[in-house]
Image (cartoon, rainbow, N blue to C red):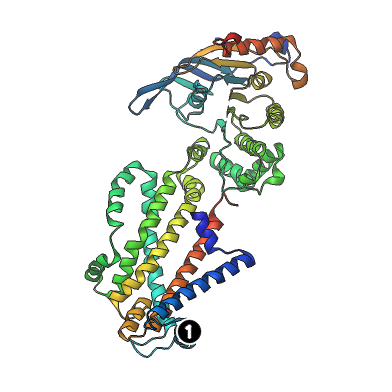
Amino acid sequence: MKANNELLIDDSSSFHKIITETSIEVKDVTVSFKSKGKGTFTAVKDIDLTIKKGEIVSIIGHSGCGKSTLMNTISGMVAPSSGEVIANGKTVKGPGPDRGIVFQNYSLLPWLTVYKNVFEAVDSVLPHLSKAEKIELVEKNLNMVNLWSHKDKLPSQLSGGMKQRVAIARAFAINPSILLLDEPFGALDALTKGSMHIELLKLWNLDNRNKTIVMVTHDIEEAIFLSDRVVVMNNGPAATIKEIVDIPLARPRNKKDIIHLPQYIEVHDRLLNLLFDKFSIEDL
Amino acid sequence: MKKILSKIYSPSGVGGILYFLGSMLILLGIWQLVTFITKSEIPGPVATWTVFSEMLAEPFYDYGPNDKGIGLQLWYSLRRVFLGFALGSLIAIPAGLLMGSSKIGMKLLNPIVQILRPVSPLAWFPLGLLAFKASDQATIFIITITSLWPTLINTAFGVSSLPADHKNVGKAFGFSRWKYITKILLPFALPHIITGLRLSIGIAWVVIVAGEMLSGGVGIGFFVWDSWNGLSLEKILSAILIIGTVGLLFDKIFNVLQKAFSYESK
């Protein structure tokens, strides 16, 4: 399944390196849940998706289309009913430290300080490190998201954006090769969201764009700004991939500038049509 | 309901103290009224106060098995309550953790809890006597077995309501079982457990009086019964005031603990 090796992503991103390694392979994955008295509910069906190392891929679709379920098969939180997911060359059997997760609702432990929230994750994933090395790692990652000065605060004392930065620092601190973001910025206001996008790309750049990032979102602009490719899902149940759209915009991207580019407008319209093909203006 | 209770029991500032004093005045008024209606068959606040201050003047005297000061009586009762309550909690918290964290545990243990919970402490007393051959241990036994239920039920409820979000953190970062229990499960369940303990100590304190009336010997409950036999209603009323005040103090202490360990309010 490594047929796409040595593939140059596209011309406009000449700056993009030649990507050779496959990071994630989703092979013919179907996920069904048994629901009480209603038989089985199939969330996603026959999903095939290959993601290269260092790629940023967004999964977009309407609410309940199974995009989070698809993501959870990669994280290992949900086991596929059939098919398999391969991450870093190994079949996914459960959550693992090579895949960092940032949850939709931050999922910080409310009784632990910002520092402790990151520390416990580091301590759990990297038990062989000395105490000093762990502390250094926590400090480095909290500094990256500018929260070291808030390290002794509890999550309830932080704003939504700050909480999500802690969650991102926590995910980066264990240095996973794959970062999975489940609607990470969905609960944030537009301004905070914008700065979080830049923050995320900054962290990705600092790491030489080596981390593969998969993000679930329902925000088209967010998907275009951040991603190399956007996976558009059909509506569930039994959702499938409708289309995978390449984003032909060179990095680094400037939010203000790209929205006027014809490529941006074209890809934006394309995604909008894919998501809203059922409705026309007359229906409203 | 919880808010109202905590407002009543934790008067804040001068206003709170004034309300508390007002409340005491109403109590004294009702008491005086009852005394008046019963033509002083039930002694009034003034008569009780005279006896009460005599009792407090020498609380720790000890003139043999049936004649001890009120301080000593209270001390023995507190000892029994703490022993019974501690034993009960030692059983209730692990059992609650077990019940709350597994569906099978819940299904197996819940019927037992539901059947034993409503049993009166007095019904347990003969069993205690039979098992321990001593009334002191029997009293501790009935406190244990009647006070453990609120802690058990609250612990089980606390653990079973652990949100999936918190569990997922443990899964995503591969927490060991020990880390999961100490960093996720227990911190989450702690406020629930303390609520349970608060209810349990209240029950233990109610049960002790009944238990000691049956067991005799020494203790605040025995003191009430002994005063009845000596026909000293002033002493009984004094004991009731002491029992009430100690109960209020217990509640206050656990209220403080509850606030200290609840993460949302911080």
Task: Indicate the position of residue B36 as horizontal and vertical percent values.
Answer: 42, 80
What residue is shown with label 1? B46
Answer left or right for A56 relative to A251. Answer: left
Answer left or right for B53 relative to B132. Answer: right
Q: Nearer the viewer, residue A232 or B264?
A: B264
| Quadrant of residue B44 within the rendered picture | bottom left
Q: Amino acid at mark 1?
A: Val
Answer left or right for A42 relative to A257. Answer: left
Q: Residue furthest bottom?
A: B63
Residue at left offset 47%, top offset 43%: B176
Q: Nearer the viewer, residue B107 or A138?
A: B107
Res A9 seen here: no
Q: How many marks?
A: 1
Res B96 seen here: yes
Q: Nearer the viewer, residue A18 or A246?
A: A246
Reply above or below: A181 against B161: above
Reply above or below: A211 against A170: above
Count neighbours of disc 1 (C-alpha within 10 A) and say few if under 14, some if 14 to 19, many if 20 or more: few
Task: Indicate the position of residue A162 as horizontal and vertical percent values.
Answer: 67, 39
Task: Indicate the position of residue A267 as horizontal and vertical percent values.
Answer: 66, 11
